[in-house]
Image: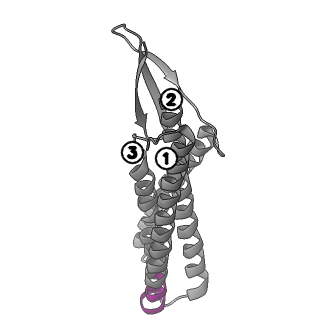
Amino acid sequence: MKLCASYQVLWWQTVLCFEIRFFAKRQTVSGKHNMTEKTLTTIFIIGQYLAFVAWTVLGILIATQIFKRDFHGLKLSSLYLINSIVFVFAYGLILKLALIVMAPIEQTKEKSIETLRNYADNFFSDFILFTLITTSVLTVLNILYLKYFAKTKLVKHTLILFIADLSILLLASYISTEWYFNGLLQEVYRHFN
């Protein structure tokens, strides 16, 4: 007799299987999916490093501009620093679904997978809506900031920030829903085996 319990840490899943013994044998389970877990993890880690590098460079740039009394450059650097909050939003999107560890179980495996895919698609739609609203609000704030406070080239900086914000949040939405689907798909497979 085999009893299995699973726990999910961020994006991968480890299964503890107990076989009438008092210790657990670890097994990693996998499912069929479009992107591999390694690819998703690599993209996530690159995003973390990118956020760290962006904040470090902006911090150094702002410090040098303060010492040089370059207030025009300081205004632009501050705008980019304010927009770097999308990294925090992206991390929140990823963690939101990483904490869900119970798969929807239906009468059959196929029905459970279909329900899981519907849940993942609904989450992805919600995240896309959040991404569009957040990017729109940040774009309006960027335009107002550049027009009335920084008084500099409006189109260039607005376009750069819009593309960066949209790309980061869209990628985070995709990674989050793929990890959700892949992790819980393993639960569905294990339930019906």
Q: Position of residue 184 (x, y in %)?
A: 48, 40
Mark 2 closeness class: few <14, some 14–19, many ≥20 residues within 10 Å: some
Chief SS of the magenta region: helix
SS label for mark 1: helix
**Segment colored magenta:** 142-150
Extreme residue in the top direction: 21
The verdict on residue 134 being magenta is no
Q: Amino acid at mark 2?
A: Arg
Figure colour scheme: one colour
Q: Are marks 1 and 2 in contact (CB under 8 Å)?
A: no
The answer to whether residue 53 of the structure is visible from this angle is no
Mark 3 closeness class: few <14, some 14–19, many ≥20 residues within 10 Å: some
Q: Amino acid at mark 3?
A: Ile
The residue at the point 43 percent across, 83 percent down is: 141
Question: Quadrant of residue 163 in the image?
Answer: bottom right
Pointer 2 residue: 190
Q: State which tag comes first along the sequence, 3 or 2.
A: 3
Pointer 3 residue: 100
The verdict on residue 149 being magenta is yes
Q: Which disc, if any, is residue 180?
A: 1
The residue at the point 55 percent across, 81 percent down is: 158
The residue at the point 55 percent across, 49 percent down is: 114
SS label for mark 3: loop
